Amino acid sequence: MKNISLICIMLFMTVSISSIHSMTDPKWSPDGRYIAFSDFYRQRVVLYDTIVGTSLALEGTATGGRLAQWSSDGSKLAFKVVQKQEDNQTRQAPAIWFSSKNEIRLLADVSSLSGNPVFSANEQIAFTTGTQLRILNQDQDETHRAELPSYANWIALHPHKPLAVYNDDNDALWLTDYHSGKHQRITPEDQGYCRPMWSPDGNYLLISSLSGTLF
């Protein structure tokens, strides 16, 4: 994978868990070692190490913790970096924190609009840059790219087939075959839907309406 520069220098700071008063969206790593959460007040991702008993704040990771996702082995945490620049415009980029190296790597160049990176069941990584869907393999090398009908902040990848499900601007869910480039709307127009999730075998898709009903 080519090297991509960070938006800014990201500082790793050891902080006391008791000094953080606005923790939200906690997420256990699958190996049980870390808890990732958002420090809402300071707009950063914080990782609590349950073995060492210390917390690591990833500075420069505004809004990143809300939709952060662990890889299946707990070695990587994917999230979106959103930062304000000197011109007061925000720039976004998908990123991964590697626990073994304690480093953050951006998966794409910064842009005005980027989606949250997500892991599939077979450890592929998906995210959007503008209206482009991008798929990376386990080595973070890009394998596929497809144009979507609209920007999508969250992608659900099928575990075995080249299929992706996502929201459009009106909260309708779409299914895209990123090999053929074909798109299909899969929800009715009666209400909005969000956060699609494939079953591990790929036979079922769980979705939620904006009102909280599961289908």
Image: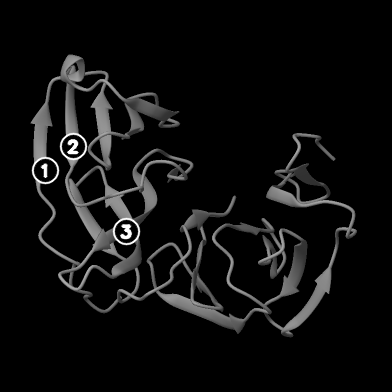
- Name which residue type carries label 2: Ala
Q: On the image, numbered disc 2 is attached to which residue?
A: 57
Find numbered disc 2 in the image and state the secondary structure of the residue it sits on: strand
Q: Which mark is residue 128?
A: none
| Mark sitting earlier along the chain (3/1) | 1
Q: Which mark is residue 12?
A: 1
Q: Residues within 10 Å of mark 3 (few under 14, many from 20)?
A: many
- Left or right: 63 as drawn, with respect to 124: left
- Left or right: 56 as drawn, with respect to 127: left
| Mark sitting earlier along the chain (2/1) | 1
Tell me whether the residue at label 2 lies in contact with that at label 1, contact meaning CB atoms closer than 8 angstroms.
yes
Q: On the image, numbered disc 3 is attached to which residue?
A: 82
Image x and y of residue 166, in percent? 67, 61
Of tags 3 and 1, the one toward the viewer is 3
Q: Nearer the viewer, residue 118 or 18?
A: 18
| Residue under the image location 19 percent in, 14 percent down | 18
| Residue under the image location 29 percent in, 49 percent down | 62
